[in-house]
Image: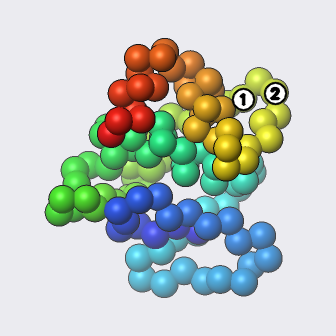
């Protein structure tokens, strides 16, 4: 589940079906939702989406996770299972995207 208009990623993994979407929130379905949930909360993926896929900003800090744009976001497929946690999330995603140190430093300063 995610909010369309945000200032930062707002994805929620509802494993028990306890929440419902209203006018500007949407539900993703399919396989590998927990993996996608983590990827979409990373600094790298947020930077890529805001810069190349969001279709422009909303005000100074806002942007939209519009379905048509979100579907075009390239999400790397891992070759081995990844155990994401708060401490390794960004580092793991940088490795998945095969980013160089200079690219990581740039994203970290944004």
| Number of marks in the rendered image | 2
**Residue 7, x across and y down, in percent:** 35, 62
**Residue 87, x across and y down, in percent:** 67, 44
- Label ID, residue 80: 2
Q: Residue at x 47, y 58 (%)?
A: 9
Is label 2 in contact with label 1 (beta carbons under 8 Å)?
Answer: yes
User: In which quarter of the view is residue 98 placed?
Assistant: top right
Q: Secondary structure at mark 1?
A: loop
Q: Residue at x 61, y 32 (%)?
A: 91
User: In which quarter of the view is residue 62 placed?
Assistant: bottom left
**Which residue corresponds to mark 1?**
78
Q: Can see residue 53?
A: no
28 up-or-down from 93: above or below = below
29 up-or-down from 91: above or below = below
**Residue 31, x across and y down, in percent:** 75, 51
108 up-or-down from 42: above or below = above
Q: Residue at x 41, y 59 (%)?
A: 8
Q: Nearer the viewer, residue 88 or 21?
A: 88
Left or right of 81: which side holds 51?
left
Q: Nearer the viewer, residue 25 or 99?
A: 99
For the C terminus, give its image quadrant. top left
Q: Residue at x 73, y 44 (%)?
A: 84
Q: Secondary structure at mark 2?
A: loop
For the N terminus, give its image quadrant. bottom right
Q: Nearer the viewer, residue 38 or 74?
A: 38
Q: CA distance from mark 2 to mark 1?
A: 5 Å
**Residue 30, x across and y down, in percent:** 71, 55
């Amino acid at each position: 589940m995610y909010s369309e208009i945000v200032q930062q990623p707002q994805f929620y993994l509802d494993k028990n079906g306890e929440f419902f979407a209203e006018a500007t929130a949407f539900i993703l379905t399919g396989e590998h939702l927990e993996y996608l949930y983590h990827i979409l909360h990373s600094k790298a993926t947020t930077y890529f989406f805001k810069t190349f896929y969001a279709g422009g900003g909303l005000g100074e800090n806002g942007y939209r996770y519009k379905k048509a744009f979100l579907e075009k976001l390239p999400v790397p497929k891992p070759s081995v299972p990844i155990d994401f946690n708060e401490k390794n999330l960004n580092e793991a995603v940088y490795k998945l995207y095969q980013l160089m140190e200079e690219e990581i430093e740039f994203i970290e300063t944004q």
